[in-house]
Amino acid sequence: MVSRRGFLQGGAIGVAGSAIGATSGSLVANALNNTAAETATAKRQLPFYGKHQMGIETPIQAVTNLVAFDLKPETDRSSMLRWMTLLTDDIARLSRGEPVLADPAPELAIGPAGFSAYVGLGKSMFIKLGMESDIPAGFIDLPAFKMDQLEEKFSGGDVVIHVAADDPIALSHATRSLVRDSIPFASVRWTQSGFAHTPGVVKSGVTHRNLMGQIDGTANPQLNSDDFASVVWMDQGPEWAVGGTQMVFRRIAMQLDTWDQLGTKSKEEVIGRKLASGAPLTGTLETDAPDFAARLPNGLSVIPDFAHIRRAAPEAFKERIFRRPFSYEAGISESGSVDVGLLWCSYQANIEEQFLPIQRRLEEFDLLNKWTVPVGSATFFIPKGPEPDSVIAQALFS
Amino acid sequence: MKKIAVLLASVLLLAGCAPAGQVEISDAWVKSGEMSVEGGMTAVYGTITNNTDKEVTFVGGETAIAGLVEVHEMAMIDGEMKMQRIEGGLVIPAGESAVLEPGGNHLMLMQLTGDLMAGDMISVKFDFEGADSITLDSVMAKPAEGGDESYHETEMDMSN
Ligand code: HEM
Ligand SMILES: [Cu+2]
């Protein structure tokens, strides 16, 4: 309908402009089509209230900021509740595409633009506030892994706010709004920015590619399925934790200079999946289940013993996680090496039982480790989502 | 904020209840900062929409956290922006809204009875001539920068 209207209007202008009629007509039609596309992107609104915080069980947005905070010494439990009150109100408004209260730049609230934000709490926060006994089961600090080269400036944090949107201006405006309301309570420890595909570039539901070129996310549980719920959301524990989840954040640098020296076949063997289709080496479609038992005539496994998906696949049913990694690009060196990688985020109901055994297997043996280096690390507990008139983590801080 | 006022107005028109409209206050907040401590001052902001068919005047208010509450405006005095009491109150013509914002009109809270901290919720009564008072029970204290410069100036202003 929109394009037809565009065509008709274009025709009308064409008549008036005689000689340049045809060209200007199609230009106007294009402009109107663009407007329609922009409006759909600007209008996409994700629900804020509900059992779970927003921004996890949702298709990945175009751009993201993770901001981690350290509590100010005077911040106590009651100040945490005031902080969460401010953030809850801000996120509710931003999710509707409205400016926050006291917004110094309300003009920048152009629409929800797929905005989401959730708040996570680090183990260090529970300890600083003397709330060790509230730490949910399975929510652990990660041990050191032998491939880690962690940097303080990318790691840890008492509280995280993870913001995402389909537009960089909307993201920047929202992030600033949330940070402004955080500064009375905490100082910024680190910020990390990332991205995925822009809406409309890949069909919705299509798995995104990372900067190594791989289709990344295939074996994830399906959004909005019972399976997803059992992998990700806590179903026991204190009231504020049920419906929450445990997040692992890893900043993982990719060594593309050496990775690019591999041929396609080698690259595919490192993962155990084909680059073009994302299909397992034993199948033809992305959705085909990998056959880890399949052997080549020479007796070797089709999906090699060192392949990332063989090492990462669950050995016990509960060893499953939901991965939602954004890419990052943080500069290019004088010699042309790009500093890229993943802001690798995973969500699971229990870090110790679900994530840790996978990461242990990858630590022990995963050829991908040759080209990927964890440089940042943190874990956060994401409390359940707020109902209208309640506040994120209200019961925890009341 | 203006958009919301227009929206509200059009919703009321659509509902066909324009003559019996009321005064509404949306997006109210109170500022928390260095000055919002016991004995200090702060201000309440928001949008007041007059959906009645006659003029109303915003004349003042009341809140437990302030000893003195006044409707203020910003004005150029001796080449500097300063704030001062609006004598007789702020007139809001029928069908229009008044935006209270940092650097503009505001409901001034003085002689604070305690510290107002970011994220606190306070109850504020808005008083009108030509309409009933409105009490908002959860006006949120937001950390904000805008409009701060005038506070210092005005301490002197207010003593004369
Ligand atoms: C830069 C680092 C990484 C890259 C580039 C990467 C890439 C991939 C790719 C391409 C796949 C196959 C497609 C898919 O199922 O998504 C995959 C699968 C998987 N990865 Fe990673 N990954 C990385 C780090 C990690 C880490 C740190 C973990 C966990 C500790 C992990 C756990 C998994 C799991 C559980 C699967 C699914 C395995 C299955 O059941 O088939 N990955 N990864
Ligand atoms: Cu004033």
Image: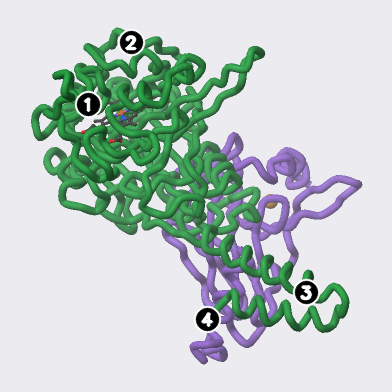
Chain colours: A green, B purple
* Among the two numbered marks 1 and 3 on one chain, the one whose residue lies closer to the N terminus: 3
Q: Are discs 1 and 3 located on one and the same chain?
A: yes
* Residues at marks 4 and 3 touching, judged by CB atoms closer than 8 Å: no
Question: Looking at the rendered structure, which numbered label has been put on residue A147?
Answer: 2
Residue tagged by mark 4? Answer: B11
Q: Are marks 4 and 1 in contact (CB under 8 Å)?
A: no
What's the amino acid at mark 1? Ile
Location of residue A176 with respect to B125 vertically, above or below = above
Amino acid type at image mark 3: Ala
Q: Dot 4 surroundings within 10 Å: few (below 14), some, or many (20 or more)?
A: few
Disc 2 + disc 4, Cβ < 8 Å: no
Asked if residue A183 is positioned above or below residue B100 in the image, the reply reads above
- The amino acid sitting under disc 2 is Met
> Residue visible at 42% across and 22% down?
A263
Q: Same chain for the residues at labels 4 and 3, yes or no?
A: no
Marks 4 and 1 on same chain: no
Asked if residue A199 lies left or right of residue A281, the reply is: right
Chain letter for mark 1, please. A
Residue A388 visible in the current orientation: yes
Which quadrant does the C terminus of chain A fall into? top left
Kindly identify the residue that appears in the image at 50 percent across and 30 percent down.
Answer: A328
Element on which disc 4 rests: helix
Give the residue pinned by disc 3: A22
Q: Is mark 2 within 8 Å of ligand 1?
A: no
| Distance in Å between CA atoms under marks 4 and 3 | 42 Å
Measured as percent of width and height from the top left, residue A247 is found at 29, 32
Query: Rounded to the nearest whole Å, what is the CA distance between mark 1 and mark 2?
Result: 23 Å
The subunit carrying tag 4 is: B
Residue A369 vs A1, above or below: the answer is above
